[in-house]
Each structure stands twice: as structure tokens, then as C-alpha cells.
Image: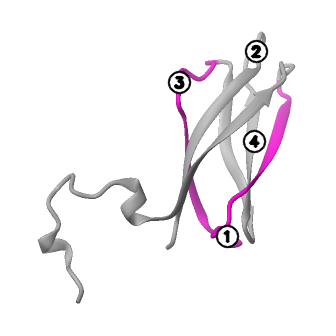
């Protein structure tokens, strides 16, 4: 049996309903100098090379930093944080992620 879009109530699905995998990652991010970056590889079974990973911090993210998923390979993705302003502080960061099966 299958369902189509007409049978799904708006707001009736959560990330875990549509993602191949969901999880959290904890990252101890060191203080970064201006225009410098730090990468964190994350093991996540179900990720495929070129796959789509959605990532969001669970709390306030320092405004001097930007983050992005910068690469995926089999069962792994990499998160990069870069300092865009002076005074970027690190610290313990926690992210939620979802691997989408597109």
C-alpha cells in the first residue's frame, strides 16, 4: 500500500519520517582566527557520496562563525566552521542532522 501527497496532513510528518538517518553530533570547536576554518568528519551510516545532509545547531550559534556541510562520502559527512569576524570563540557545540534520501 502507498499513500500520496493528498493523504498527508500539513505538519503531519517529522524529519524522522522522511530522512534516511537522523542524529546529533557534539563538536568541541577551538577558537578560530579570522578567516580560518575547522573541519569535523561525522560517521553517519546511510550517507552516500553527493548526498544531502541538513544540519542545524541546537542552541545559539556564535555570530562570528558560519558552518556548512562541505562533503559527503559513503557513511560520512564533513562539517566545516569558519570565522568570518575577529573574536570567534569556540566551545562545545551540538548539532542535529538529517540525511535525506534524494
Q: Nearer the viewer, mark 3 or mark 2?
A: 3
Say the numbered circle drawn on residue 85.
none
Residue 84 rendering spot, x and y as whole percentages? 73, 24
**What's the residue at 71%, 72% (across, down)?**
49
Q: Are marks 4 and 2 in contact (CB under 8 Å)?
A: no
Residue ID for mark 2: 89
Q: Which residue is mark 1?
A: 50
Image coords of residue 36 (percent x, y) = 86, 29
Spatial separation of the CA atoms under disc 3 and disc 2: 15 Å
Give the alpha-carbon distance from disc 4 to disc 2, as whole Å: 15 Å
SS class, disc 1: loop
Going from N to C along the chain, the mark reached first, 3 or 2, is 3
Please give left or right for residue 49 compared with residue 60 in the image. Answer: right
Image point 53% across, 31% down: which residue? 58
Residue 63 at x, y = what percent? 61, 18
- Left or right of 47? Residue 4 is left
How packed is label 3: few (under 14 Cα within 10 Å), some, or many (20 or more)? few
- Residue at the disc numbered 4: 80
> In 3D space, how far apart are the residues under numbered discs 3 and 1 (Cα atoms)?
27 Å
- Residue 12 counted in the magenta span: no
Image: 65 above or below 97: above
Q: Are marks 3 and 1 in contact (CB under 8 Å)?
A: no
Residue located beneath label 3 in the image: 59
Q: Report the Cα–Cα distance between label 1 and label 4.
A: 16 Å
Q: Secondary structure at mark 2?
A: loop
Quarter residue 65 falls in: top right
Amino acid at each position: 500500500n502507498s499513500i500520496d501527497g493528498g493523504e498527508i496532513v500539513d505538519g503531519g510528518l517529522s524529519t524522522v519520517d522522511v530522512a534516511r538517518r537522523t542524529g546529533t553530533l557534539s563538536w568541541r570547536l577551538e577558537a578560530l582566527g579570522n578567516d580560518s576554518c575547522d573541519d569535523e568528519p561525522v560517521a553517519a551510516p546511510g550517507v552516500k557520496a553527493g548526498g544531502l545532509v541538513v544540519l542545524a545547531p541546537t542552541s545559539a550559534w556564535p555570530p562570528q562563525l558560519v558552518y556548512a556541510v562541505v562533503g559527503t562520502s559513503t557513511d560520512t559527512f564533513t562539517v566545516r566552521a569558519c570565522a568570518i569576524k575577529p573574536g570567534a570563540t569556540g566551545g562545545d557545540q551540538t548539532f542535529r542532522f538529517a540525511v535525506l534520501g534524494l
